[in-house]
Amino acid sequence: HSLRRATSASQQSITCRNLSSSSTPHRKVAVLGAAGGIGQPLSLLMKLNPLVSQLSLYDIAGTPGVAADVSHINTRSEVMGYVGEDQLAQALEGCDIVIIPAGVPRKPGMTRDDLFNINAGIVKGLCTAIAKYCPNALVNMISNPVNSTVPIASEVFKKAGTYDEKRLFGVTTLDVVRAKTFYAGKANVNVAEVNVPVVGGHAGITILPLFSQATPQANNLSDEVLTALTKRTQDGGTEVVEAKAGKGSATLSMAYAGALFADACMKGLNGVPDVVECSFVQSSITELPFFVSKVRLGKNGVEEVLGLGALSDYEKQGLEALLPELKSSIEKGIKFANQS
Ligand code: NAI
């Protein structure tokens, strides 16, 4: 409530007017890790989203400033900032969607799994609070390694008795965003029209773009080009980590991707038909308990986990190759959640 002050009285009345004149449902969205590299631009983009009515910005430090800043933007949502664990309950109460970009990012030479030791504990703590204060929220997990943090979240929710597989998502939208951009560049098609499913997981070879299903379909791409596009999509995060040379990983493109995914979740909740995004969810389309594939979003979260469709031989090989690594990352998360 220290940040209630950030929203001035006059602004509150504007907010109320906007709310009452709007027929879109009330939606409270929380960003956990809101003062970070992803958190700040993501908070900005969520403030611009007219589907949000209340924006709750939480971090262990720095949120008063971010919330005061973002709250001055004249869009629908009321912004509240919360700092420190004793304000986490308020940040979460009544949330429809909780987006989690809390945790440390990679530095050059690190894999996403190198983040496990720090981020696993952060995610476990935040999910314990979600189970307590907003058990019905859709959880959008951004914190890496996503291949392990989503299984950790599922175990925390199971222990609390609140787990619903329809409401837990690993955010892999950035892989799709990258695949679309890189494909459009090579295929010489309008990037705004491109769609490329990306399946598997969210680390290295577990990221499997399905260029054979890309639309518009380009027939001019050689096997060499498709291999290079696949590799670039898998290494897109590392490309950014190296370019930032120790100053973190993707933040701006990730904020964009996170905002897209949260928007899709809200549209689903609001009953918009045929909202389909790729996400890392509980799944039975392979032998693994979690997998990234296209998912239809609806009023309860996951409405339907869609199958993989027809794969090229190259993609079939990629699928076989990724399963052991993804399996072990999932098991690592489950083990962590149950032993500590
Ligand atoms: P950052 O270090 O700039 O920001 C992280 C924020 O989390 C900081 O403000 C920090 O205070 C906060 N934080 C730490 N512990 C917390 C806690 N217990 N509760 C709430 N907030 C807490 O890092 P950045 O660049 O924003 O990355 C965040 C995470 O997102 C990393 O794990 C990174 O690997 C991941 N990431 C995921 C991507 C994806 O595609 N899913 C893409 C890029 C990054």
Image (tube, rainbow, N blue to C red):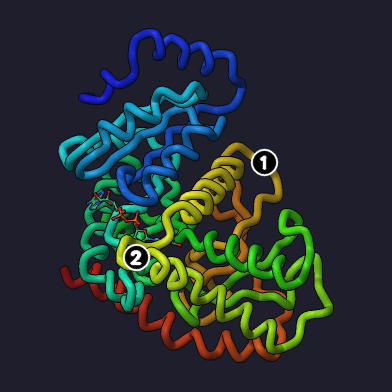
- Asked if the residue at label 2 sits under 8 Å from ligand 1, the reply is no
Residue 246 visible somewhere in the drawing? yes
Q: Residue furthest right?
A: 219
Q: Quadrant of the rendered structure where residue 134 is?
A: top left
Q: Residue at x 34, y 19 (%)?
A: 7
Q: Nearer the viewer, residue 121 or 237?
A: 237
Q: Amino acid at mark 2?
A: Thr
* Residue 122 spot, x, y in % from top left: 23, 57
Q: Which residue in the structure is indicated by mark 1?
A: 272
Near mark 1 (Cα within 10 A), the count class, few <14, some 14-19 or many ≥20, is some
- Say above or below: 294 vs 66: below
Q: Secondary structure at mark 2?
A: helix
* Residue 214 in the figure: left or right of residue 74: right
- Spatial separation of the CA atoms under disc 1 and disc 2: 29 Å
* Residue 234 spot, x, y in % from top left: 52, 76
- Asked if the residue at label 1 sits under 8 Å from ligand 1, the reply is no
Q: Which-is-in-front pick, marks 1 and 2?
A: 2
Q: Quadrant of the rendered structure where residue 263 is?
A: top right
* Residue 260 in the figure: left or right of residue 124: right
Q: Amino acid at mark 1?
A: Val
Label placed on residue 152:
none
Q: Quadrant of the N terminus?
A: top left
Q: Secondary structure at mark 1?
A: loop
Residue 151 visible somewhere in the drawing? no
Q: Quadrant of the C terminus?
A: bottom left
Q: Residue at x 50, y 55 (%)?
A: 253
* Residue 267 spot, x, y in % from top left: 60, 41
Q: Residue at x 27, y 54 (%)?
A: 160
Q: Which residue in the structure is indicated by mark 2?
A: 149
